[in-house]
Image (cartoon, helix red, strand yellow):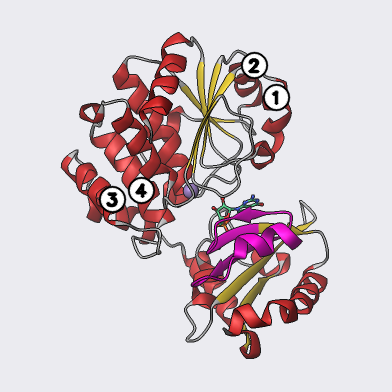
Amino acid sequence: MTKELAQNAQKLIESSKNIIIIGHKNPDGDAVGSTLGLHFFLKNYGVESTVVLPNDFPDFLKWMPGVDTILNFEKQNSQSVSALENADLIFTLDFNSLSRVGEMQGILEKSDANFIMIDHHQQPDAYATVTYSDPSIGSTCEMVHHFIEGLGKTKLIDADIATLLYTGIMTDTGSFRFPSTTATTHKVIADLLNAGANNAEIHQNVYDANSMSRMKLLGIALDNLHILKEYNTAYITMSQEELDANNFKKGDTEGFVNYALSVTGIIFAVIFIENKQEKIVKMSLRSKGDFSVNEVARAYYNGGGHNNAAGGRSELSLEETVKQFISILPQYKEALTA
Ligand code: 5GP
Ligand code: MN
C-alpha cells in the first residue's frame, strides 16, 4: 500500500471517535479474520472499535480469538443499528459494494461517516473516503497486514492478531495453493508465525471440524456431481429437501464445489444450492486458469468475485437454474476448451 494511503487512513483513525469495522454477509474466514484482526490491532494502537457482521458465520470459525466481541446485526439488531448510526468512521473489509452487506445496506447509505475500504475484489464501488483495493492480493487478511506495515506498526501484531490474519489468508488462498499465493504471501505468513500464530492448530481447527451430517451432505453432493465434458465443466446441485434431510447448518457446503473442480480436465465448476426461505438458488463458481467466473457471475447471476472464485444467485427454480446455466455454456465454449 502507498504511503499516501496509509497517511490518509491514519488521519481518519486519529480524528474519529466511533470506529466500526464491518465485513460482508455470510462472513467467511477472511471476513472474520480481517475484521477482528484489524479490531485487535487498533486496540493495541490505542484506539477502540467495534466489529459488526451482517449475520452469523459457520461453526468451523467459532474458535477464532475474539468472536464473542462481534455484534451480529441479525441477532443483536438494535445494538448494531445504534453502533452503525453513531459511527464516524466505518472500515469495510473484504467486500467492495454496499450491496454485499444485506440488511445493513440502508444504514450505510444514509451514514455521514467516513469509509475506509480494504478489499481484494475486482471493480470496487466508489463509496469510500480511502480505498485500499488490490485484486491481485489473495486475501483481505494479507492486505490488513500490509496496512499495518504501512502504518509502521507491525510490532503491535500479537498472537491473536497473527492467528486471525493467518486464518483468513489460509482459507482465501485454499491453503496457499491458488495462483494468488505469492512470495509476499509467504513472507507475511512467516511474520505471522513469528508473532505467535500456531499453523498446525489453525489448520486443524478449520479443516478437521466436520460433523457427521456434513459428511453425509458431501456424499449427496458427490452423488449429484454432473460432468459436461464438451465444456470441461462440472456442476453439483443441492436441493432444499436434501439439505433439510441432513440437518444442514451454515457452512456445511463450504468447499464442496472444489470437488467438482478437482475432476481431471475440468476448468469450470459450479454448485447450485437451493434456498427456499430466500427464494433463490445460491451459486458458487470456480475455475482454473484464465476463464473468468467473475464475468459469468456478473453477466448472469447478479454476483461477482474474482477470476477463479465468484458467487451469485438465481431466482429461478433449481431445475430451471441448471437448465438456464447449461444454455449459456455454448457462448463460452471457445474459452472453456482453449
Ligand atoms: P463463495 O462462492 O465462496 O461464496 O464466494 C466466492 C467469492 O465470490 C468470494 O470472494 C465472495 O466474496 C464472492 N461472492 C460470493 N457471492 C457473491 C455475490 O453475490 N456478489 C458478489 N459481488 N460477490 C460474491
Ligand atoms: Mn476475501
Which element carries disc 4, helix, strand or loop?
helix
Decide which of 296, 73 is in the foreground and name it. 296
Question: How far, Cα to Cα, is label 1 from label 4?
Answer: 30 Å
Which element carries disc 2, helix, strand or loop?
helix
**Residue type marked 2:** Glu
Q: Is residue 326 above or below residue 139?
A: below
Image position of 265 (left or right of 233): left
Image position of 195 (left or right of 217): left
* Residue labelled with disc 1: 107
Query: Looking at mark 1, is its residue's CB closer than 8 Å to ligand 1?
Result: no
Judged from this view, the residue extending furthest toward the left is: 194
* Residue labelled with disc 3: 184
Q: Please provide the residue range marked out in magenta.
A: 282-311
Q: Earlier in the sequence, mark 2 or mark 4?
A: 2
**Residue type marked 4:** Thr
Decide which of 97, 132 is in the foreground and name it. 132
Question: How far, Cα to Cα, is label 2 from label 4?
Answer: 30 Å
Whether residue 23 is visible, yes or no, is: yes
Instruction: Tell me, yes or no, whether the highlighted magenta stretch contains residue 226.
Output: no
* Residue labelled with disc 2: 85
Q: Nearer the viewer, mark 3 or mark 2?
A: 3
